[in-house]
Image: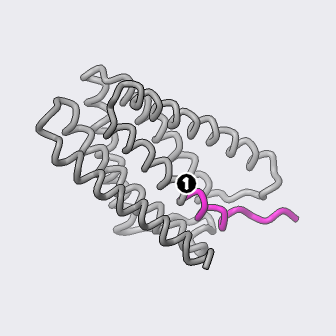
Amino acid sequence: MRQRAAPVCKYTVYTLLIINVWLLVRAAGAEASVPYKAVDQIGWLLILGVFEWETRNPANGDGRRLHGWPMGVELLGYGFALFALGNYWLAREWLDVGNSLVWLGISAMLWLDILHPVDAMSSAHRRRNAAKLVLYGATFVFAVLWGIRDALLDFYDAALWILCFFAIEMNLLRFVVPAR
């Protein structure tokens, strides 16, 4: 029962995230920064999809990245995310700038975990987890700040992304080299 509940929960969160992206796309005409948020969301949805694809199959965790269309989709996603980041910067949307930079940092850490799995008891593993803890902690701070500002869609969005990347982190546990 427990083994079936985790995928159901994960894909329910992913479905809520797709609905969230749809809400942001619909709201794109109402606020100046929302079109960039919609582009950002689509980019990160593409990146999340590739991370899910890469991490659900432990055979991909041998230090090789997928090639072909998954890499193209991921690069397109990063292009969208960087385009949105540039526009947040130009619009002086500092909360969005900070949030984008933190998520890019998390993405880099996940990429490192996929490319170079390390021993579960190594100092490298502890350093990686400490860095990710700081980065994920920052995402919680951004979510709280949006909540304080009454930006409920941004708060909801941040909470969903945190849950989605938690699911990717759970997939990554398969890549950690067991302690000897």
Q: Give yes or no for residue 173 being in the magenta stretch.
A: yes
Locate residue 41, reporting x and y percent.
Answer: 31, 47
**Helix, strand or loop for the magenta stretch, by majority:** loop
Mark 1: secondary structure: helix
Left or right, 58 with reference to 28:
right
Residue name at image x 62 percent, y 74 percent: 2
Query: What segment is highlighted magenta in the picture?
Result: 168-180
Front in this rendered view, residue 20 or 97: 20
Query: Could you classify mark 1 by the number of other residues whose Cα lies within 10 Å: few (under 14), some (14-19), or many (20 or more)?
Result: some
Q: Which quadrant of the figure has residue 37?
A: top left
Q: For this rendering, which residue is in front, 12 or 115?
A: 12
Figure coloring: one colour
Q: Is residue 174 left or right of residue 91?
A: right
Task: Say which quadrant the N terminus sits in.
Answer: bottom right
Q: Is residue 64 above or below residue 97?
A: below
Q: The C terminus is located in which quarter?
A: bottom right
Residue type pointed to by label 1: Phe
Residue linked to disc 1: 166
Q: Give the residue furthest to the right.
A: 180
Q: Is residue 68 above or below residue 39?
A: below
* Residue at (59, 75) in percent of width and height: 59
Q: Position of residue 20 (x, y in %)?
A: 30, 51
